[in-house]
Image: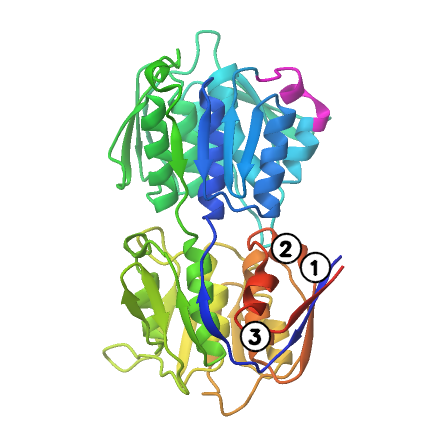
Amino acid sequence: MSSFVIEGGRTLSGEIIPQGAKNEALQVISATLLTSYPVTITNVPEISDVRNLIALLGMMGVKVVRHRKGHFTFTADEIDRDYVMSDDFVKRCAALRGSVLVVGPLLGRLGKAYFPKPGGDKIGRRKVDTHIQGFVNLGATYEYDPAKKAYLLAAPPDGLKGCYMLLDEASVTGTANIIMAAACAKGSTTIYNAACEPYVQQLCTLLTQIGYRIDGIGSNLLTIEGNPALSGCEDKCHDISHHILPDMIEVGSFIGMAAITRSSITIKNVCYSELGIIPESFRRLGIRLEQRGDDIYVPAQDSYVIDTALDGSIMNIADAPWPGLTPDLLSVMLVVATQCRGSVLIHQKMFESRLFFVDSLIDMGAQILLCDPHRAVVIGHDHKFTLRANHMVSPDIRAGIALLLAAMSAKGTSTIDNIEQIDRGYEDIDGRLNRLGALITRIP
């Protein structure tokens, strides 16, 4: 287990470029299984979760060519059917959260797919019901294989069939998985209450390049015209390419980093039009930021004052399906609020264990009242009291980056263990932040 040693209290300056979006990368790389023709993807973040998914595709028989950093071509013309039914495949999938996204393409293309309980963050129960119910709606059956500790999904002999379905929740990965399976189904599939995050929109855009027809992109009502013969891409076999968006979670993390360290930072090439409510959510915490073309400039502030509601009541910041605030940024916003002026209620609705990392912040001197597993009230110090250094453990990707920001603002030297969790979502984060003036040492 590796660690970060962080010398806190340093002021940062300069420019930083966000990596490609992790969640989009996992989706579009999985989508390359839907065609036999080469698909070139650029701006791929080479973080551990993405590297592990790429390695998994290679074991499945997909030809992977790395042209240079972040630039790959995938050709899934010879999928190894025996391997995707093997114990080794299931075991590797169970250790990788992003592997859930290969289930839809494999079920649609091969007619069978194992669906193990996904690995990844320890942030509470992560249901797969939406995924499996979507596949069942398309005609698939499933049974639990106790030897493999996985569900075995199977399409009917004549293939999946398009239908209308109303999802029980607007799950991002569930929507993506069902879209990819529906692309191989016979007839038209309509998905209502679909997730409409930019990641899902990007996936749909790639599928239209491959040759599938999808209507309603950007809305919560999608219609996919299935093409089980995968014949739509014959004229484009040399020109299927996709560029991954900047990671909005990194953009938000860097906004929070500038605020809590009272630093002046420019975040470059953020694709501002795809950030949704994120900039305004940080403004509600009193953080000033300016759009400069496609960059965000965050000036140094000695103090930032949290807004109150119109009736004067405490500000409530909660996650919601897109275009609401992504839950992946609430941990960062909570840490930033510890040094604001004012109070805020952070309401994390999706995961029941994601706020438990606040114990480490309380040990550092933060004023936080954990109401229940989903809600915490933060009473800001307004930089009148500096957080104390601490020895911490990263429980998941997002809590990990939040603890790193807290350590960077704290007085003294902090240590964060289990930084493999941070590496799953943030590429070379210590190197990039050190170039801005941080002092973070990686201990293998």
Residue 223 higher or lower than 330, as above or below: above
Amino acid under disc 2: Gln
Instruction: List the single residue furthest toward the front.
Output: 68
Residue 326 higher or lower than 45, as above or below: below
Question: Horizontal and vertical percent for residue 249?
Answer: 45, 57
Secondary structure of the residue carrying tag 2 is helix
Q: Which residues are magenta?
A: 79-88
Describe the colour scheme in one phrase.
rainbow
Image mark for residue 406: 3
Identify the residue shown where x is 51% and y is 27%: 74
Kindly check if marks 1 and 2 are in contact, taking CB atoms under 8 A apart as contact.
yes
Amino acid under disc 3: Ala
Q: Who is closer to the viewer here, 102 or 13?
A: 13
Q: Which residue is mark 1?
A: 418
In the rendered image, the quadrant that contains the C terminus is bottom right
Image mark for residue 421: 2
Question: Horizontal and vertical percent for residue 421?
Answer: 63, 55
